[in-house]
Amino acid sequence: MKVAIATDGDFVSAHFGRCPSFTIVEINDGEIVSRKRIDNPGHHPGYLPQFLHEMGAGYIIAGGMGQNAQMLFNQNGIKTIMGITGKVEEIINQICNGTLQGGESLCTPGAGKGYGIDKTECDHGEHIHS
């Protein structure tokens, strides 16, 4: 399986579309086959789900994302795992061990234009790097 992790430094990004990079990990039978970090090519509606689909990702992991993005990932055959916080290395270990458990998205809908480039902040709270 190939997993894309929204990455901010050494941590899982609180919001997938605003992450500086993605860590792309291919895992087979609990072992890491390949791992690379790529820059986020840009956040505009519908682009990232298609981009990550073309890279072969079957999963996207992030702290949160909006409902529309979740729907677009689903349409591209990519499962979303939200509510994830912590160091990327720890999350990869949890994936390999089969112990990663997602939850609710850390983003809450805001007024106006959603989570796109015109919104200056998401309501993540203080649990971005826990």
Image (spheres, rainbow, N blue to C red):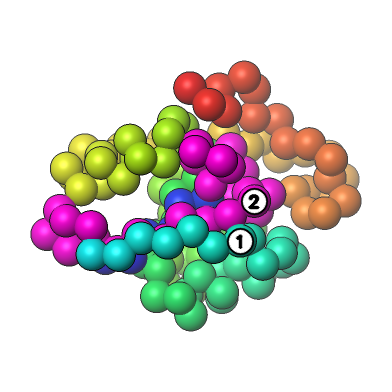
Q: Earlier in the sequence, mark 2 or mark 1?
A: 2
The residue at the far bottom in this view is: 54
Give the residue drawn at x 30%, y 65%. Answer: 34
> Can residue 85 be seen?
yes
Q: Quadrant of residue 93?
A: top left
Q: Which mark is residue 20?
A: 2
Report the side of 130 relative to 102 (left or right): right
Q: Is residue 10 magenta?
A: yes
Give the residue drawn at x 23%, y 64%. Answer: 33
Q: Which mark is residue 13?
A: none
Return the residue at label 1: 39
Q: Is residue 122 magenta?
A: no
Quadrant including the N terminus: bottom left
Total count of labels: 2
Q: Nearer the viewer, residue 35 or 53?
A: 35
Query: Percent position (x, y) of residue 44?
Result: 74, 65
Report the side of 56 relative to 29 (left or right): right
Callout 2 touching callout 1 (CB < 8 Å): yes
Query: Percent position (x, y) of residue 54?
Result: 48, 80
**Circle 2 crowding by C-alpha within 10 Å: few under 14, some 14–19, many from 20:** some
Query: Percent position (x, y) of residue 19?
Result: 63, 49
Query: Percent position (x, y) of residue 10?
Result: 49, 38
- At mark 1, the secondary structure is strand
Mark 2 residue type: Pro
Find the magenta span and give its range.
7-32
Report the side of 64 relative to 91 (left or right): right
